[in-house]
Amino acid sequence: MKKTAGLLFTLLLAGCGGPQKHKTEKLNLSEQTKGNTSVVVLGAEITPEFQQEIIKAGIKLEGQNIIRLTGAASDLNQLNIPVKDSLDYLLDSEIEVSRDQVGKPDADAIYLAKKEFGILDLWKTNPEADGRGVIVGVIDDGISPHQVGFQRTTTGARKFLAKTSQSTFSTYPLVDAEDGFTVEIKEGMTFGGKLDLNLDGTINNWKASVSLDGSRVCLDLNVDDKFDDSECKGTFAKTGDYYLLPKQPTLALMTEVDLAKKTLKVLQPEKDDDSHGEGVASVMAAHNSMGGANLDGVAPGAQIVDYDLSELTNKPVENEYTLGTFLLAIDWLGSQGAEVANVSYSLFFTNTATQAFMSKALAQIIEKHNIVVSFSAGNNGPGLGSLNRRLMYPSSTLVAGAYVPKELDERVWGTTGLPEEGRVVYYSSRGPGAGGAGPTLISPLSSLTHSSPNLGYRAFNGTSSASPALAGAATVLVSAIKQAGLKVNAATVVAALRLSGRRISNEPFVSQGYGLPQIPKALEIYKTLINGQNFQNIAVSVNRGGLDGTAAQGIFVKTSQLTNSVETYRVLFTGELSTLAPSDATINLLTPVDIEYSKGIKGPKELWVAVSQSRIAVDVNAEEMLGDVNEAFGEIRLYSKADKTLLAVVPVTAIRDLRPRTFLRQSLTVGSQEGARIHLNIPEGVKGVRVRTRVIEGESSFLNLGTFTPDYVRAEQIAFTREFIMATPKPGHYQVTMLMNGGTERSATVEFEMEEINLKLNTDIAGAEGGKINLSNLAQSALQGELVLVREVSPIKSQIFNNKKDIPEITMNVAKGSYAVDLLPTAQYDMSYFYANCSIMVQNDKGEFEATDKATYHNDTDKEATLKFRCVPFDWGIAANDNLFWKLQISTIVEEAKVRFDLGGRMKKDFVLPKLEPGIYRVEYSTIFEAKRINLGKIEVI
């Protein structure tokens, strides 16, 4: 390493006011040198205060005993460097990167999606369109201000602007004092366990103080009844200050003061299990995450505001995970000036109709704040229809599927065998979801990111990383639009990204949507949309196939349901203009289109699209589509006659779903990061399917097996095994799936042999002592395992409610025993992905209700306990959804009885039961291979 200066200096103490644990000294460097200076320092003490100071100054720190500091000389000279005795330093070679060059694109920026989006090409002509001038919002489990990638933008501006959460547990009242306010910080029990704010290993109360103007907050973090200088900071939103915790100096607290409400909010620290938000924010907008532009986020010039969903609370309403959680979060981000936001969380629904209501609510909040929101498609693949919540996302949002490029997979994940253009990764949720559609676009896995503050960096994947990459691409586009002097409309930004998509071959539309957006092309498309030259969206409606009374946006054909060899569908098209388009475009825009059809689909070859409705009638021949395979993906594609732009796609999916009566054999082949499916038609009365596997080619070490229900929910995913059982509690379309997690250039082929489990319970009544039950195995294969008898106990209490009624809270005294609270829909629906937020609070000796961290409670004393039960579904509170009812019920938890089970094929047998209490029992079959159970029916024990 070449040295430009080798003189060692001994520096004098530079005095600082207030108590000091170490004396501090300053550097004395020439400030005439352009660019950054690197200096090697001997004798420095790395204290939490010093770490915070260098991060705020945007200085890079390397080493421990001997350290190297890199930054502008003027910033280095301002440092107060803690020392034990004396400080020596020497100049290292200069770094030829000036601060105004930090945002310059790196041609080797493979890790964070820029190349796949065409952003590197955009930056050749528009290098400042890197997110500058745009605030992005993160809705996740929080990010830490201590991470280097969240310090500065490419212009040197402050990166991380504001943070909040819905929790008020760590919000405390201000008490008037002579020179400001005093505050008592209370730690304690939450629904997520005990909250130790200062992470000192104890749960107690400690003090804080706030200045009269609310600008300065002191926290007694080391609980010594005094405030050190390091414990007094400005509020985060105004100053960017934060506190490093004495016991864990890589973790940080932030504070906010609301003088109008006279409260202090202490934002809870990000811990090891809070790394998801760090990864999301890194992908979207981090800068210099590892000291180099090749680990910048997609939009490193953007600034960040953060809504933390993970903060602990003791209030049920704040702990509940509902659509309202996200609407409030988007509303807050919009109020902070965010123009792009990311949500990499799962959303749920009671039935398909509630998805349509949720879509309207999301559209309204997005329009209110003119904000682009990107949602992750989910990691529920490889089952078809696994994007079962697709209908809840309005056309003004982005839904990101996960794409893995070959280069990234090799260099980050150590995986080979992908095709040259990459592929949609096996776990990416795909259509045909509710309504028939798939993701809007695909986005690269964006792997190397910040983890939680204690854990450094990690390889971050999943649609949780693809979605913020897509949000980052939207941010770059918004930045470019602003620099072009154009107005920004969120829905039009989404449309321009969609229409710019570059599709990859050998991936169906239901998996990749419109493909990978290309930002240079999207910028040009945006101009045509706001000028009223093209429709920003063509809404599609299909007259058949909608679920729970909703309209379909695609066609999904199952051979088991065909009544004719050819089925006819009517497809409607309606053009939608950008709100920025000239007003006369509504009258004047008429777009002639050419229509192309995949094999097995026939219809007219030309049409027109306007703001009024146009339509076509098409014939779909599923058998012609399928040929000799069991799934086929067709399309109806609308192209502009004028410029051949792809304007809209109607996906047509056909499957051959077979009934596995006896020994149905099917084979699946998968390559690296790929998934495949077998489709089964299960009629009423079939309890389950026995699946045996045999490797024909390759090996099983990277293989996983899975099953999917008729709601297109993954029931399980397991390591490869030679035999397993799929429970089929209701009739419909089931899937058996296989995937290769990682892999090499070797593919794997597996033969599956499937047979219906047909166990018949022949007994209605059995004796409490020495009783027997008789079972018939109507299938050919023998079955082994256990019979499990579960006593059915009527709910202690239940209550039915809908959106017109307040969420019920049931308070009751309970005796010794175990209790559970649950929430159930009161009806069966075409499709449901149900999620209930249930909580139990217990009354303490002071008469106050305290949170518990489970939806079950065990009272192991002879004294009665007073409990408060509450449940709410994810889609609670959706307007115009009054016909939807749920049942809250409280039950005791009872022990189960088990009987060894072995029954040959086509045989009948008695099984002796253990001594049982009288009552009604549910009889279930559990296999020897896994804990899954199949319900066989009920018996009465007398």
Image (cartoon, helix red, strand yellow):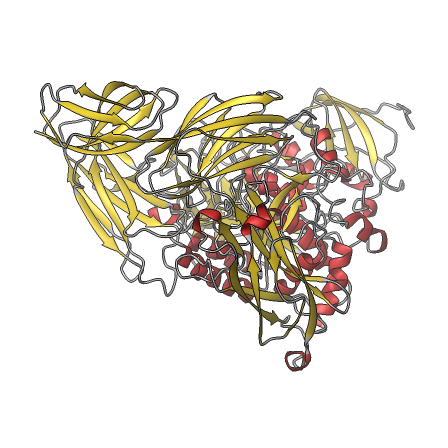
Above or below, 527 against 667 in this view is below
Residue 395's spot in the image, x, y percent? 57, 61
Q: Nearer the viewer, residue 844 or 880?
A: 880
Task: Give me the residue at 53% from left, 50% from top.
Answer: 432
Q: Nearer the viewer, residue 161 or 370?
A: 370
Quadrant in which residue 426 is drawn: top right
Above or below, 125 against 65 in this view is below
| Labels in figure, total | 0
The quadrant of the picture occupied by the C terminus is top left
Residue 745's spot in the image, x, y percent? 70, 26
Task: Give me the residue at 72% from left, 51% from top.
Answer: 502
Would residue 274 be visible to someone looking at this image?
yes
The quadrant of the picture occupied by the N terminus is top right
Residue 815's spot in the image, x, y percent? 14, 33
Quadrant in which residue 902 is drawn: top left
Viewed as shown, does residue 291 lie left or right of 95?
A: left
Q: Nearer the viewer, residue 27 or 528?
A: 528
Viewed as shown, does residue 369 lie left or right of 915?
A: right
